[in-house]
Image (tube, rainbow, N blue to C red):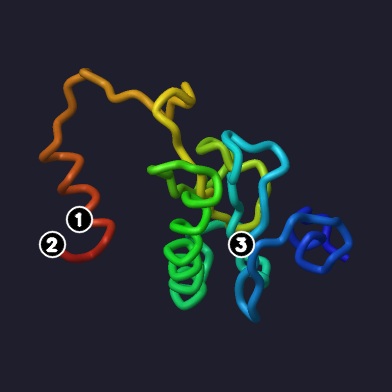
Amino acid sequence: MSDCVFCKIISGDIPSHKLYEDDVTLAFLDIHPVNAGHVLIVPKAHFENFAQTPKETVAALMDLSQRLAPAVLKAVGADAFNLSTNNGRAAGQLIAHTHFHLIPRFPTDGHKMWHGSDEHQDFAAVALKIKECVGRSA
């Protein structure tokens, strides 16, 4: 048996407030929500993070996210949302199972995502390095 908490939710060993389930995906409420209606959208198969998840599975997760978002917004009375994933510990990924956060947002919720930097960067050099790593030019 896996030690992954999301795998245990998927198998039913840990209870959750499931919102949607099919052969590939599961959506359920986050037990530590940023705001009411904070949903986690996961693949049923275990993949450690977004970068390791097959593109067909990512497409299914995105499809479900797009389908759920209007329902979540309507249910909680929000008019905006964040859709995000954390990939790796340094990015804040706490559970090593691919997942997306669909977080309803309100003008006065006080939730801050991140801040930009005014620090100068050599954008051309960074862009060139990324292009080389991708293996093709944009």
Residue at which label 1 appears? 131
Which residue occupies the extreme bottom position in the image? 23
Q: Given this view, does label 2 or label 3 mark the residue nearer the observer?
A: 3
Residue occupying the point 61% across, 68% down: 43
Residue at which label 3 appears? 42
Vertical placement of residue 22 versus 16, above or below: below
Vertical placement of residue 75 versus 61, above or below: above
CB within 8 Å, label 1 to label 2: yes
CB within 8 Å, label 3 to label 1: no
Q: Which amino acid, by three-letter code, is at mark 3?
A: Val
Does 29 sit left or right of 105 as displayed?
Answer: right
Query: Element at badge 1?
Result: helix
Query: Element at badge 3?
Result: strand
The first of marks 2 and 3 along the sequence is 3
Residue occupying the point 65% across, 41% down: 94
Q: Which amino acid, by three-letter code, is at mark 2?
A: Ser
Which quadrant would residue 7 be assigned to in this image? Answer: bottom right
Residue occupying the point 72% across, 42% down: 31
In three-dimensional space, the C-alpha distance between marks 2 and 3, rounded to whole angstroms, equals 32 Å
Count of numbered circles in the view: 3
The first of marks 1 and 2 along the sequence is 1
In three-dimensional space, the C-alpha distance between marks 3 and 1, rounded to whole angstroms, equals 30 Å
In three-dimensional space, the C-alpha distance between marks 1 and 2, rounded to whole angstroms, equals 6 Å
What x and y, as percent, mark residue 84? 46, 47
Q: Which amino acid, by three-letter code, is at mark 1?
A: Lys
Residue occupying the point 50% across, 62% down: 68
Question: Which label is found at residue 137?
Answer: 2
The first of marks 3 and 1 along the sequence is 3
Q: Residues within 10 Å of mark 1 (few under 14, many from 20)?
A: few
